Amino acid sequence: MTPEDLPDEVFSGKAHRLTMGLRPLDMATWLDPDPLDPQLARKRALLESDRAQVFAALPGTEEQCREVATAVADWVGRDLPGEDHPLVEAAAMVRDDICIMAQREGRWLLVAAVVCFPSRWRLADKLGQDVMTIHDPVPRYRQTLEAPTTKAMDVAAFKPRWRVNWTLLDDPELFAPVGPRDAAHTVGPDSYLRVERQCLVPVGGSVVFTIRTTVVRVGDLGDGRAKAVLTAAAATPDDLARYRGWGR
Ligand code: HEM
């Protein structure tokens, strides 16, 4: 996803609401395997330097990881080298972050992941949590999106889907496992628009949740688009704005 093909909905002026926005995924567009993308180089470097922060898997998930890693490698058209953990090897083939969600006793849990570009959350905090608990810090989530999210996960176990999430940050850093939510920044042309293209894809019994991140300075979006995101930010309810770290 380049700044040119950021989804229109980000600039619809309504994007301040929490929405599902799930739609069918064309599997030809699932991942980004561009070997020259600088994000991929960054990801490989992080897997070396900060492995414990960017890779996590619950015990007993080796088979699930291998299954997902093989699906990723097949999609890219390569074989897994077989020298490291399969999920790490698969993650090093694509720019997208990869989370494996597995159903246990009717709940969808995050059981393994390689996340190099978290938007102010820590993988270690979320590993083993179900999809609702993962979203606990998000105001209004339980009230508005709890039932639809569980349903979406059940559907994604059969049909590939994708959606978009976006926010404005004061920093373009991709590897952002921490974030002072209380130190609000005033959004404006010098903020960075951070867009995540998220896919939910069935592999075996699991759902693979992938995140492809694009960061663009608001002032570089062009007048119409910059105005649309800043208007949406201004219309965001206080609790959500606080969660996103936006001052008024
Ligand atoms: C199935 C549909 C899903 C929907 C509709 C959804 C939606 C959202 C929304 C609206 C936010 C708040 C972001 C914002 O508005 O600023 C969020 C945050 C987040 N989502 Fe999801 N999400 C989904 C699935 C998942 C899955 C499967 C994961 C697994 C890793 C996940 C991980 C997260 C995390 C880690 C956050 C940040 C939470 C925090 O601040 O601690 N989401 N999601």
Image (tube, rainbow, N blue to C red):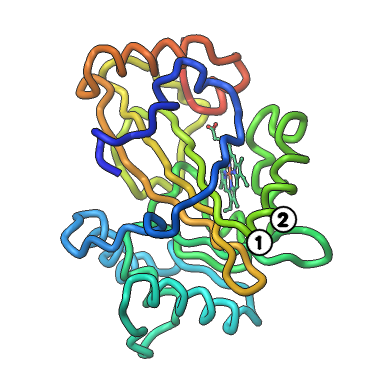
Q: Residue 221: x percent and y percent?
A: 24, 23
What residue is drawn where x is 37% and y is 17%?
187
Q: Nearer the viewer, residue 14 or 84?
A: 14
Q: Secondary structure at mark 2?
A: helix
Residue at the outermost left position: 36
Give the residue pinned by disc 2.
154
Residue 201, percent from left and from top: 55, 60
Q: Which residue is mark 1?
A: 157
Q: Relative to residue 184, is residue 141 drawn left or right? A: right
Q: In the image, 208: left or right of 43?
A: right
In this view, which residue lies farthest toward the bottom?
A: 82
| Quadrant of the rendered image containing residue 23 | top right
Q: Amino acid at mark 2?
A: Asp
Residue nearer the viewer, 244 or 235: 235
The quarter in which the N terminus is drawn is top left
Residue pictured at 68% horizontal, 48% vertical: 152
Whether residue 116 is visible here, answered yes or no, is no
Q: Position of residue 234 (x, y in %)?
A: 47, 10
Left or right of 203? Residue 129 is right
Residue 130 visible at all = yes
Cβ at disc 2 under 8 Å from ligand 1: no
Marks 1 and 2 close (CB-CB < 8 Å): yes
Report helix, strand or loop for mark 1.
loop
